[in-house]
């Protein structure tokens, strides 16, 4: 495994740890469960993630669903077929996300969760710092592309459905 893919795995573990902590913190508001798949889309991901997931699932028999209205090809019968190896973006769905947009901080939360939650109750301690982790992933991907001498540019993304091509 390349050094950068190893670091990707470590970053994914750190994100899982924080996500699990936040899911426990917000358990009374989170409605996410098997069958909830509104956020399961055909996302585009960085090559470091794409290659890591491709390697992880190469010997697995993956059943795919149909790609309808931009939904994820790995969603079959309302269940993610690559859940253990899913991309970082999928690991944070359902959580309140804090990010910078047009020079101001914004909060995003699932419309199915946090229906009886006052926005004033969200703080830096109980939201997921999306920009922080996206920046780390961006730099890691840039280093990965240099490491493998890829033709991909640092801003190139690959649709998840291409994992099965």
Image (spheres, rainbow, N blue to C red):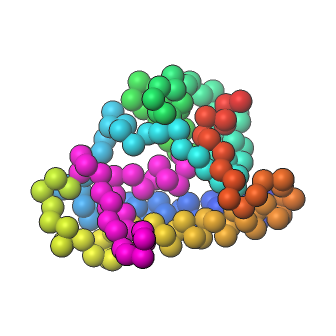
Residue 99, quarter of the rendered image? bottom left
The stretch drawn in magenta includes residue 102? yes
Which residue: 54% across, 62% down?
Answer: 13
Looking at this view, name the residue that lies furthest to the left. Answer: 116
The one nearer the camera, 71 or 21, is: 71
Which residue: 63% across, 27% down?
Answer: 61
Relative horizontal placement of residue 155, taking residue 36 as reference (left or right): right
The one nearer the camera, 56 or 138, is: 138
Relative horizontal placement of residue 142, taking residue 161 as reference (left or right): right
Look at the image and tell me whether residue 25 can be seen: yes
Residue 72 percent location from the top left of the image = 50, 34
Relative horizontal placement of residue 79, taking residue 151 as reference (left or right): left
Q: Is residue 106 above or below residue 153?
A: below
Residue 93 percent location from the top left of the image = 39, 52
Relative horizontal placement of residue 87, taking residue 158 as reference (left or right): left
Residue 28, quarter of the rendered image? bottom left
* Count of numbered circles in the view: 0
Looking at this view, name the residue that lies furthest to the front. Answer: 102
Magenta extent: 86-113
Look at the image and tell me whether residue 10 can be seen: no
Q: Is residue 40 above or below residue 2?
A: above
Which residue: 25% across, 49% down?
Answer: 111
Quarter the N terminus occupies: bottom right
Residue 144 percent location from the top left of the image = 76, 62
The stretch drawn in magenta includes residue 49? no
């Amino acid at each position: 495994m390349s050094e950068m893919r190893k670091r990707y795995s470590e970053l994914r573990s750190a994100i899982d740890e924080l996500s699990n902590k936040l899911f426990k913190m917000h358990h009374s508001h989170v409605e996410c469960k098997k069958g909830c798949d509104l956020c399961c889309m055909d996302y585009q991901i960085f090559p470091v993630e794409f290659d890591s997931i491709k390697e992880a699932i190469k010997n697995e028999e993956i059943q795919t669903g149909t790609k309808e209205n931009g939904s994820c090809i790995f969603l079959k019968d309302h269940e993610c077929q690559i859940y253990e190896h899913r991309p970082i973006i999928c690991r944070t769905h359902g959580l309140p996300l804090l990010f910078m947009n047009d020079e101001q901080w914004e909060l995003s939360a699932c419309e199915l969760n946090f229906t009886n939650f006052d926005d004033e109750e969200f703080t830096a301690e109980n939201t997921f710092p999306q920009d922080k982790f996206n920046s780390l992933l961006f730099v890691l991907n840039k280093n990965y592309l240099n490491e493998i001498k890829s033709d991909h540019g640092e801003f190139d993304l690959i649709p998840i459905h291409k994992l099965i091509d």
